[in-house]
Amino acid sequence: MKHIKLKLLFILVVTLFATYISVPESIPVSINLPHVNVNQTLHKAFLNRPLLLGLDLVGGARLTFEADTSQLDAARRQEALSSLQNVIERRVNLFGVSESNVLLSRFEGKDRVIVELPGVSDTKQAISVVGQTAQLEFMEVDGQTLKKTNLTGADLKSAQLNFDRVGGKPVVSLTFTDEGAKKFADLTTKNIGKVIPIVLDGQVVSAPVVNEKISEGAAQISGSFTEEQATQLAVQLNAGALPIPVKLIEERTIGATLGTAAIQQSVKAGVVGVVLVLLFMLLVYGKLGIFADIALLIFAVISLSLYKLIPIVVTLPGITGFLLSVGMAVDANILIFERFREEKKKELPTAHALEVAFGRAWHSIRDANVATIVTAFVLANPLDWPFLNTSGPVRGFAYTLALGIAISLFTSLFVTRNLLRFFIRK
């Protein structure tokens, strides 16, 4: 009994923490009574996490770029466009925008890239990250001119924001690949006592003096960067240079693609569905259904809190994945309760019948959920296999479905089981 109480305490703590995360960042409180008049807004003290909504629910930014493929033949054109799409997708992901769409199109003989960024209202910042070329080159000084070397941004392993130890100014720290480190060592050996200009998109951004051979495979770009500019530069360099030139031809902020009415109707349908499931469990299983409903409410609160903490961008397909996982959670409880009824008919003691029911139902629950998780893995395509789905909304559905299954296993096999162990002992 002591162990069961500790487990119930753990469930209570997890539920309270998840509830705290799930509630909005600010809660208006209004109390108007004869002797009490309170009108204020309560703010959470810590762990303020917004719920990120997708383009179909909240809108965002849409950028349209025109790619210059006039100098390429048909085979190289398609390869360059595919590479361009991949680079922009990497930049968007590093920029921190999830569930984005990067689409290729052709209009009046012109190749275009359409980038949709949910929840982004600052289009200027998005353009600076997504559309700039970020072509990095290391030069040598040859008399009064600059001379190109064989060391470029293609030799980078990683780039990250850092701060100068002396002045504390933002800089970008570079780490080269093994081959790049050899090139950099050779370059610094030949230019001891000279400057090595670092050129970004044709502009000299830094010109450090080489005091000795540098064989560690690391360098630093310094300049009059703000922290935001240095971060954006690191993102561009990590994602790679754009393989072909692009120019922005359209930028605009777009509203929710589904429309406010459609969103409200979808949310209402989801709420009605959950309520009907709660009522079904209560009417069919009585006292057992009460504990299943409690577990289901805990499931919903934990899911919402994890959407905020991970975070997961919620789209309408994502909401569908959540509702489907609700069905999976209830299905597990139904299997357990039906097994429990069968064991009670054998006149087994309640506690023993309960343990037997959970044990025998586990195999069916495991197999069903493993099959669904495999399906979610294929739809999510986390390894970015080209022959599988790469659609953002479909991935959102898969992520919420997989997460919901994991949480439903916790609530149906741990929460429901320990509630029943404590409250149904006879």
Image (cartoon, rainbow, N blue to C red):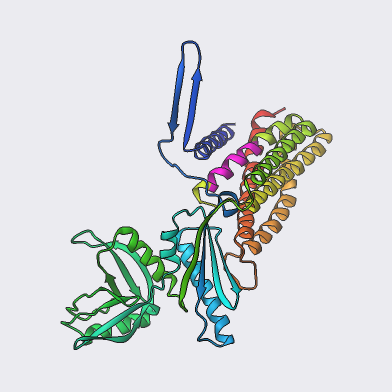
Q: Residue furthest top?
A: 34
Asked whether the viewer can see residue 217, the reply is no
Residue 373: x, y in percent?
Answer: 66, 57
Q: Main secondary structure of the magenta part?
A: helix
Tally of numbered tags: 0
177, 133: nearer the viewer = 133
Q: Residue at x 36, y 67 (%)?
A: 233
Q: Is residue 75 left or right of residue 125?
A: right
Asked whether the viewer can see residue 66, the reply is yes
* Placement of the C terminus among the 4 image quadrants: top right
Q: Is residue 300 magenta?
A: yes
Q: Is residue 254 above or below residue 148?
A: above
Residue 303: x, y in percent?
Answer: 58, 45
Q: Residue furthest front?
A: 108
374, 126: nearer the viewer = 126
Q: Residue at x 63, y 52 (%)?
A: 318
Q: Which residues are magenta?
A: 295-307
Q: Is residue 357 left or right of residue 148?
A: right
* Placement of the N terminus among the 4 image quadrants: top right
* Quarter of the figure with residue 79: bottom right
239, 3: nearer the viewer = 239
Q: Is residue 378 left or right of residue 350?
A: left
Residue 273: x, y in percent?
Answer: 72, 40
309, 357: nearer the viewer = 309
Q: Residue at x 63, y 42 (%)?
A: 411
Residue 250: x, y in percent?
Answer: 50, 65
Q: Is residue 168 magenta?
A: no
